[in-house]
Amino acid sequence: MNALELDTVRLSEDRSCLEILDQTLLPGTVKVLRLEKTEDIFEAVKYLRVRGAPAIGVCAGYAMALAASRIETQDYEAFFAEFMRQKTYLSKARPTAVNLFWALDRMERVLRDYADKPVAEIKELLFAQAQQIRDEDVAISRSIGEIGYGLLKSGDGILTHCNAGTLATAKYGTATAPMYVALEHGMTDFRVYCDETRPLLQGARLTAFELHGAGIDTTLICDNMASTVMKSGKVNIVFVGCDRVARNGDTANKIGTSGVAVLAKHYGIPFYVCAPSSTIDMSIETGEQIPIEERAPEEVTQMWYKEPMAPEGVKVFNPAFDVTDHSLITGIITEKGLCRAPYDKAFRELGI
Ligand code: MRU
C-alpha cells in the first residue's frame, strides 16, 4: 500500500466530521474514524490515533472549524466565548508539539480579525483557514523534501527515528520528504534504516510501513542497534523530525532522538532536523523551556505484549520526547531554507 495515497486527517465532504486514519491500528489494519465531537478528537490526539507535530496542527485547525460550526448563537461575544472554551480544552491534549498551539492560535486569529463579520461568515472563514493550514503543510513538506534531497548522494544510507513521515503530516512527512522527493526525481539507489522507536514503535509500525510500501529499500532496526549500523559505515546521513525547536536550535523530538544525535556525532555522520517553520518556537530561548510529555507506564511494561514484560508495581519513567542539544545538529531544514548554527540568527534571516 502506498501511504502517500492515504489521508492522515481530512474533513468529511459534507463537513459533518473529521476523518482520521487510526494510526494505533497500523500496520495491520487501515481504519478511518469519523469523529464529530471535540471530545472525540481530543481523545484521538491524546492516544496518538492522529500524531506527529504537523498532523496534530492540521487536526486542530479542522477540529476548531467543526466545533465553531456547531455553536448555535449568532451573537459574536457568546460565539467567541464558546470557541475559546473549546480551544482551551483541545490545547490540553498534548503538551510538546508546538504545532497544536500554533494552529489553535491561527484559528483564534480568524475570530479576532473578522470580529465585525456575521457569525455565519466567520464559520466559513474558519473552514477556509483550516483547509489552508492543511494545504500549506503539503507545500512545506515538499520544500523540505527538495532541500533534503539536495543533501543526498546516490547509494546513501539514511537513518531515521520515530515517524516523521507522511502519516505525521498532510503529505510527504518532514524527515521522509527527502526520500519521497528523491523517488519523484527518479533516484532510487538509497537505503533507509528505521529505528523501531520504543515504546510506541512508530518506526516499526509507521515509518517501515510507509517506506516499504513506497518501494524504498527499508531496513528496520531496534533502537539499540543504531550504533552498530553506524559503525559499520552503512549510514551516511540522519534525517529526523521535531516537535518543537527553541530559538537556539535545541530540538525536542521523539524519545531516543538525542541518543541518535550523540552517536551520529561520534561516528562523524551528518545529523539533520527537518522542521516546518510552524515547529520553531521563537518565544523560547533554549530546549530547557520545552515541556516534555510523560505518558502512561503501561506503554513501556505491557503495550504490544501478550503479557506484562515487567514486574508488577515496578517504577517506570516514560518521557515521550527528549531534547537534542543544538551543538549535535548539523543543520535544520525548514521550508524556507537550510539553517546552520547559530540558529537564532539563521531563523531570523529567513523571517521565522
Ligand atoms: O508521539 P508522536 O508519535 O506524536 O511523536 C512524533 C515525533 O516525535 C515526530 O518525529 C515529530 O512529531 C515530527 S512529525 C513530522
Image (tube, helix red, strand yellow):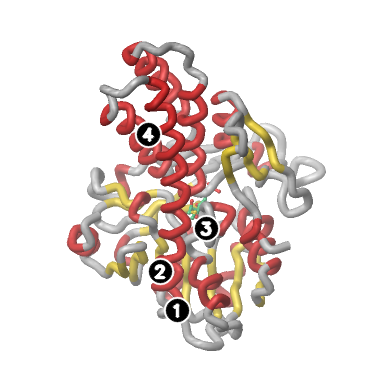
212 shown above or below 34: below
Find out whether the residues at labels 1 and 2 contact each other: C-beta distance under 8 Å. Answer: no
Task: Determine which of the numbered discs, if any, sits on residue 267 in the image.
Answer: 1
**Label 3 element class:** loop
Q: Earlier in the sequence, mark 3 or mark 1?
A: 3
CA distance for labels 4 and 1: 44 Å
81 shown above or below 200: above
Between 65 and 309, which is closer to the camera in this rendering?
65
Q: What's the residue type where badge 1 is placed?
A: Tyr
Image spot of residue 89 (x, y percent)? 45, 23
CB at mark 3 closer than 8 A to ligand 1? yes
Q: What's the residue type where badge 4 is placed?
A: Met
Task: Determine which of the numbered discs, if any, sits on residue 164 in the image.
Answer: 3
Q: Residues within 10 Å of mark 1 (few under 14, many from 20)?
A: some
- The residue carrying mark 4 is 107
- The residue carrying mark 2 is 272
CA distance for labels 4 and 3: 24 Å
